[in-house]
Image (cartoon, rainbow, N blue to C red):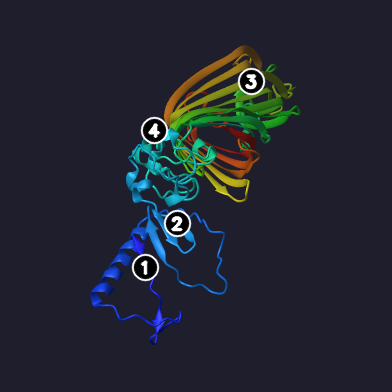
Amino acid sequence: MKIHWTKNCQRGACRNGKTPTAPLSRLAIFSRLSIMCAAWMSVVSATAVYAQSTSEGLKQAGGYSPVAATVQDGVLQHGDQTYRVVDTASYRTAADADSTESGDIEQVGHHGQGTGSCSSCGTSSCGGSCGTTIGLPTASCGTCGTACGGTKGACGLGFGSICNSNRASGLSCQGALANDPCAPCVPYRYASVEALYMQRDDVNFLFSGSLGTLPLSDFDFEFGPRITVGAVYDCVNGYEASLVGPFSWDTSNQLAAPQTIDIQLFPGVVQPHTVAGPVLTDLRRDIVVSDQSQSLTSDYFSVDASKTINGWEVAKLLLGTRYVNFGEDYRYSGTVTQTDTRNPIPATVGTPPVALDNETFTITEQQSVLNSVDNQLIGLQVGMDLLYPIGRFAYSDVRMRAGGYANFADVDYTRTGTRSELTGPDSVFGDITRPLNDRASTDDVSLAGLFELGTGIRYQVGEILSLRAGVELWYLTGVATATQNVARAGRSIDTDDDVLFTGLSFGSELRW
């Protein structure tokens, strides 16, 4: 087809100085306009035109003069420049996504197509629609959808990219790392080891009664591990398991000096006397404890396994089971001394009067108490981990866990030592020493809860290694403690106590 270029004329004279020709008829004018419109529409319909200039540059001097243009054998000739006209069947569009054949034209950057190979999509070319490696996806996967985890999901990688219900990322999907936008998400794994520096809340327990009074000191901070391993097999769904502990906190106190814990008065009591037989006396009983010592040990251990749902490397939901063991041992030992003193009323009896002296007798008991409780919690746990970027390589994170558990609690009480008893009436101040061995135990099932909150700063050291430091707060409720149940002497159990743990965490994580 030939395209004629008409020269503009003004006021009856052409710019080239020649005499203008006679006016064309309406039919001739309409025919020429139709031919020109058809030619230009065929050029505009092609979406990819490869321009190959064959001229050495503009050889015109001074301004631009219109020249004739022709199209012949797929080549557009315009002055000294030639262009190749591409047929629409020579390249692929989104409508050809299901085609297994590539186009005749190599396409680069057209409609968001990436430059990587499409061989892993299940077809030789993905129909020329591989999505984009940067930014939002703009093309359909076609038959590549199954490789992305769904039917005809979007193959594009980067922020906001969605392959059906799965997403790709530069950290965990090989497609982004290998510059292959059609590659499926490659499973990744992670493991973290943390050192927890935790403290159980202070007890401030004061044991009083027949064995004495001695307050407990505060607990110290103790180290314990938290090990977490997990895997994500399609960039969204995965599994995770963690182990916390064991932790062991202990506190103790000793007091050797005698402490008077009780004074009992019995006025006007008729009791036998070693000289004059039964007399009216005032009896005073002093109970003193010495060589006291007590200790409290608190142990904690936990293991859990959860199903995880991950989103864009910044959020993770967990649902699983957890086992928690919390136990305590309370020990007390001391020496109890009981002194009975009587004052006869009156001080003399008989004729002639016989003086009655005060009489004192002392008995001693050595006793020790061991009260052990054990809480075994089994139940369901939910959780969430959030990650928020605060710098190029730095992130802040939040770790939350909450669970409801069945608490299988039991208590064992043991009291050992020697017991001395006063006898009467003939030997009021005589004593009989007997061995002491009291034992009792009971158990119960109740509802308990465990809530954890942690936050910290994470720094990405390399491609697979990150370091983290943060703070921790744990709240354990609905459990039995040794100090709360010691006065019950094993006859019953109370599981309504609460325990608070606070501390710091330091650790690292590998992801590959």
In front: label 1 or label 2? 1
Q: Earlier in the sequence, mark 4 or mark 3?
A: 4
In front: label 4 or label 3? 4
**x, y percentage for residue 369?**
61, 22
Q: Which mark is residue 4?
A: 1
**Mark 3, residue position:** 368
Q: Secondary structure at mark 4?
A: loop
Report, in whole angstroms, how far the alpha carbon at label 4 lies from the one at label 1: 50 Å
Q: Quadrant of residue 226?
A: top right
Identity, as a three-letter code, of the amino acid under mark 4:
Gly
Q: Earlier in the sequence, mark 4 or mark 1?
A: 1
Q: Which mark is residue 83?
A: 2
Q: Quadrant of residue 321?
A: top left
Report, in whole angstroms, how far the alpha carbon at label 1 lies from the one at label 2: 17 Å
Residue 134 is left or right of residue 334, and the answer is left
* Residue under the image location 39 percent in, 87 percent down: 11
Q: Quadrant of residue 337?
A: top right
Q: Is residue 275 above or below residue 293?
A: above
**x, y percentage for residue 208?**
62, 32
* Residue under the image location 38 percent in, 34 percent down: 123
